[in-house]
Image (tube, grey):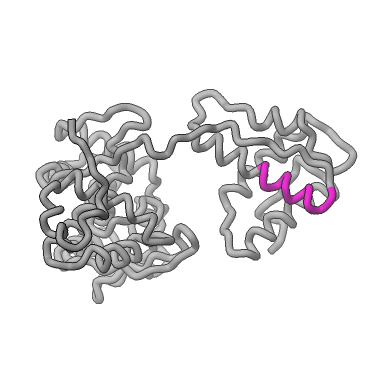
Amino acid sequence: MTSKPYDFNGFVGDFRDLLIQFVQLKHSVGFSYAADADSLKRFSKFSLSYPRERPILTKELVDAWTQKRSAERDVTWEKRINSIRQFALFLRDLGHEAYIPSCKAKINRNLYVPHIFTQEQLRRFFTACESINARYPSNKDLTLPPLYRLLYGCGLRISEAVDLKLKDVDLSQGLVTIRGSKFDKDRLIPLSPSLNQYLNGYFSKVHAVSTAEDFFFIQKDRTAISPDTVYKYFRKLLWRIGISHGGKGRGPRLHDLRHTFAVHSLNQMVRQGMDIYCALPILSTYLGHASVTATGKYLRLTEEAYPDILDKINRTCAYVFPDMKLK
């Protein structure tokens, strides 16, 4: 690892070397740490206004850096605080003076209830996708419809979808390879026959002269389409089919296509007679979760979307679903 990708130019001498050493430590234990390293790089520039002769992380500097910014989301604020906190702990362990900030962002991660799309809503959404009108020379009218179908049809995270390259999508075998995703996991995702056929049609229109290293969802300038663009068109399509947005933090979110895939898949497996305890590990592995516990929330979502599903498993494990009082 060289210091070139992380030129912490706000610091000099030992402090810059300590930042590089800290990032290298994170890499050595398996963390990609790209976003946090970028945050620390911005912090190093910010520190230019707080000169020091020795590698000391003062309270004045840390408090100034960890102030919440205008229009900054709590989750972004939390990540920014945590990155400098981890660096401060690292400095303390090495015997340097460092003020350790507390996390000021108090995030309730259980407030948001994902929107589970009905089959009728999905039908209208994907129909609307076919009428995307992208201005020339954009090819979003070709790229976005298959991308949205892949997000729902395979339950992918948006980052996983836009990072796909041609070498990761084997349409002859109907397999997608997700590389180095969350928790640094690789996994194979099978495509349904109908989705595979749809992606083949997209491939023939867009990738006549592409190479294995080109992005699968590619723009006219050969770059990957951005998640922000995908979300912007997602909001427009929802508005077009009459699904209102509740405002910031209320959804429906693009990520709700992944939630919908999980709920629909779990519902289908249970209806086909699969034991819930067999279905959950399969779904967990498919989604790329670190544990079955992370997939457990889809039990509640499945019960809310399909109340009658309890009849299928009531004899063996109905207690898996919490008691709920519907108002």
57, above or below 322, in the image? above
> Which residue is located at x 40 percent, y 52 percent?
159
* Camera-nearest residue between 184 and 223: 184
Looking at the rendering, the stretch of residues picked out in magenta corresponds to 84-95
* Camera-nearest residue between 271 and 317: 317
Locate the N terminus and report the quarter of the image it occupies: bottom right
258, above or below 249, in the image? below
Q: Residue farthest to the top?
A: 70
The answer to whether residue 142 is seen in the rendering is no
Locate the C terminus and report the quarter of the image it occupies: top left
Residue 171 at x, y = what percent?
A: 25, 71
Confirm whether the magenta stretch covers residue 74.
Answer: no
Magenta span: chief secondary structure: helix
* Camera-nearest residue between 242 and 219: 242
Residue 265 at x, y = what percent?
A: 21, 58
Q: Is residue 242 left or right of residue 174?
A: left
Q: Residue farthest to the right?
A: 53
> Which residue is located at x 72 percent, y 39 percent?
100
> Which residue is located at x 30 percent, y 38 percent?
113
Q: Quadrant of residue 278?
A: bottom left
Confirm whether the magenta stretch covers residue 93.
Answer: yes
Q: Is residue 246 left or right of residue 65?
A: left
How many numbered marks have been drawn onto this rendered protein structure? 0
Residue 182 at x, y = what percent?
A: 46, 57
Residue 262 at x, y = what percent?
A: 26, 55
The answer to whether residue 69 is seen in the rendering is yes
> Which residue is located at x 22 percent, y 60 percent?
317
* Camera-nearest residue between 74 and 310: 310
